[in-house]
């Protein structure tokens, strides 16, 4: 399902997802510089299918995981995808998404569950667990973790993400 080819590496120009910058500061008398990335905040959802007593995850190709699975000396364009198959970058994850809309977080979580996993979950069945910070070494993004119980009757589509956006997500239950 994850056929990756023609892999090359380039410098990031303008991105709507990440903005690199550096911060200079003094900590306990030591002058420091730290490289950071501004990113979108996100939601993630622990999904439990009560009908079948299983957790629901998503599987997808993550370029960052892929490139960091390749030895540094081989990270030259083009990447040899025969030597380094796409499976190196496939992850098993919670359903999640960035906060890029002016909507309540529960609504964004609901939309992500529907898009990625195919379950139509009422808003009152999505419970907030905790806010926390992720990628603390370089971004410090704000993440909100939710919990949702679903049943097979709530399944309205196969999920899989937004194909028109180039998302290729496999639901794993």
Image (tube, rainbow, N blue to C red):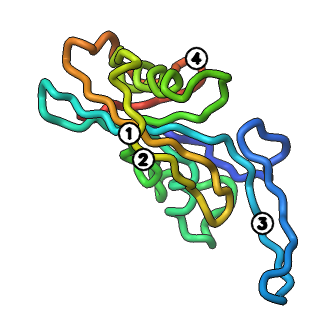
- Measure the alpha-carbon separation of dots 4 and 2: 20 Å
Q: 83 or 134: nearer the eye?
A: 134
Q: Are marks 4 and 3 in contact (CB under 8 Å)?
A: no
Query: What label sits on residue 59 in the rendered view?
Result: 1
* Residue indicated by mark 3: 35
Q: Are marks 2 and 1 in contact (CB under 8 Å)?
A: yes
- Measure the alpha-carbon separation of dots 4 and 3: 33 Å
Upstream in sequence: badge 4 or badge 3: 3
Upstream in sequence: badge 2 or badge 1: 1
* Residue indicated by mark 2: 90
Position of 156 relative to 30 (above/below)? above
Q: Residues within 10 Å of mark 3 (few under 14, many from 20)?
A: few
Position of 171 relative to 40 (above/below)? above
The spot of residue 38 in percent (x, y) is 74, 50
Q: 58 or 104: nearer the eye?
A: 104
Q: Residue at x 84, y 41 (%)?
A: 14
Upstream in sequence: badge 3 or badge 2: 3
Upstream in sequence: badge 4 or badge 2: 2
Q: For mark 4, give the secondary structure.
A: helix
Marks 3 and 2: which is nearer the front? 3
Image quadrant of residue 119?
A: top left
Q: Is residue 80 visible?
A: no
Of the 4 image quadrants, the one containing the N terminus is: top left
């Amino acid at each position: 399902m994850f056929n990756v080819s023609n892999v090359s590496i380039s410098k990031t120009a303008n991105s709507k997802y990440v903005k690199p910058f550096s911060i200079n500061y003094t900590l306990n008398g030591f002058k420091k510089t730290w490289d950071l990335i501004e990113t979108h905040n996100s939601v993630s959802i622990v999904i439990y299918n009560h009908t079948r007593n299983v957790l629901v995850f998503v599987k997808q190709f993550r370029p960052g995981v892929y490139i960091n699975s390749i030895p540094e000396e081989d990270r030259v364009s083009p990447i040899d995808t025969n030597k380094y198959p796409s499976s190196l970058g496939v992850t098993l994850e919670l359903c999640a998404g960035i906060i890029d809309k002016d909507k309540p977080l529960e609504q964004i979580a609901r939309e992500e569950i529907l898009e990625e996993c195919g379950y139509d979950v009422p808003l009152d069945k999505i419970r907030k667990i905790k806010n926390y910070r992720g990628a603390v070494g370089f971004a410090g993004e704000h993440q909100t973790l939710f919990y949702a119980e679903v049943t097979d009757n709530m399944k309205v589509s196969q999920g899989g993400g937004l194909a028109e956006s180039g998302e290729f997500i496999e639901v794993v239950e």
